[in-house]
């Protein structure tokens, strides 16, 4: 496994296992298989409602805690945001059965972002969250947070895949020491990604699948990826990407697939802001 070094010196695997949309009743088995396949970065969230299952898999794996990199995420909190953020963090920690998190992310750029971030900074200073970051922050919101707070987010997890590549976002993050992380790396199968002729041709040249090509393209760009699967054979395939490298021409061919917009939804869309801001997670 290759690592990236976050802005506070913490080492983070460049490839991990995500559990978004895995039902709670299937999560423990899936995480157990992922750990057996060699994954050490696990990504969950309070909003996924499967933290307890992730925690059981970690506990039963027998893998030393220091070998794992565990991420979960804070949902939008009601006022008082600082107090509720601390409570939500402890709830997640309890569900996971852990003493600390390797990375704690603010899941959405809504609510009292500053109050939530102040609490997260304190969790980081106390060593309860080794690194803190955000998710779904567009450049303007990210830069505002960076410029007006003491601790710069270590990570920004955003939609990133061959059809929405976020190169300008990544460059801004690089300038400010923020690590880009992808969600939706396979675009959830949209645009026929798994049979796309460009990606298929690159895969054929290396004897690799389209999924492996996409993950190699992401990690070769320095993007941390967290593919999800409930099939052990796919988990093994997805982690087997460090024995080949895309050429400059192949990287350029994937770059040409850029469509320039989200395939899901825009976090700046007022209707989406209303919907996400109104949602509450029992944590």
Image (cartoon, grey):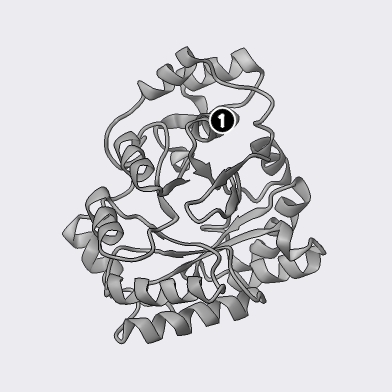
- Among all residues in the image, which is located at the extreme right? 62
Left or right: residue 221 compared with residue 216: left
Front-most of 137 and 199?
A: 137
**In percent of the image, x 34 and y 42: which residue is there?**
175
Q: Quadrant of residue 50?
A: bottom right
* Residue 224 appears in view: yes
Categorize mark 1 by other alpha carbons within 10 Å: few (<14), some (14-19), many (20+).
Answer: many
- Relative vertical location of residue 215 with respect to residue 266 in this rendering, above or below: above
* Badge 1 element: helix
- Among all residues in the image, which is located at the extreme left? 270
Please identify the quadrant where the N terminus is shown: top right
Left or right: residue 38 compared with residue 193: right
- Relative vertical location of residue 43 with respect to residue 2 in this rendering, above or below: below
Name the residue tied to disc 1: 216
Front-most of 154 and 200?
A: 154
Residue 259 image offset from top left, x and y in percent: 29, 30
Residue 272 image offset from top left, x and y in percent: 24, 60
């Amino acid at each position: 496994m290759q690592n990236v070094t976050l802005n506070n010196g913490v080492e983070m695997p460049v490839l991990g296992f995500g559990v978004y949309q895995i039902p709670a009743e299937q999560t423990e088995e899936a995480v157990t298989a992922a750990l057996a396949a060699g994954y050490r970065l696990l990504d969950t969230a309070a909003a996924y409602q499967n933290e307890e299952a992730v925690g059981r898999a970690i506990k039963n794996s027998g893998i030393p805690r220091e070998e794992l990199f565990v991420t979960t995420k804070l949902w939008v909190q009601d006022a008082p945001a600082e107090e509720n953020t601390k409570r939500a963090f402890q709830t997640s920690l309890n569900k996971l059965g852990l003493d600390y998190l390797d990375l704690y992310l603010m899941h959405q750029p809504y609510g009292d972002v500053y109050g939530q971030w102040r609490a997260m900074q304190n969790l980081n200073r106390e060593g309860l969250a080794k690194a803190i970051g955000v998710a779904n922050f567009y450049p303007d919101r990210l830069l505002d947070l960076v410029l007006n707070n003491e601790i710069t987010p270590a990570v920004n997890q955003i939609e990133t895949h061959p059809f929405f590549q976020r190169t300008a976002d990544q460059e801004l993050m690089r300038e400010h020491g923020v690590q880009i992380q992808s969600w939706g790396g396979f675009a959830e199968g949209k645009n026929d990604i798994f049979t796309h002729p460009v990606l298929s041709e690159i895969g054929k040249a290396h004897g690799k699948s389209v999924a492996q090509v996409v993950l190699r393209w992401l990690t070769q760009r320095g993007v941390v990826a967290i593919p999800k699967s409930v099939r052990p054979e796919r988990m093994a395939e997805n982690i087997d990407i460090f024995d080949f490298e895309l050429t400059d021409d192949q990287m350029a061919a994937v770059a040409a697939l850029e469509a320039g917009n989200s395939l899901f939804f825009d976090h700046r869309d007022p209707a989406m802001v209303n919907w996400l801001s109104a949602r509450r997670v029992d944590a």
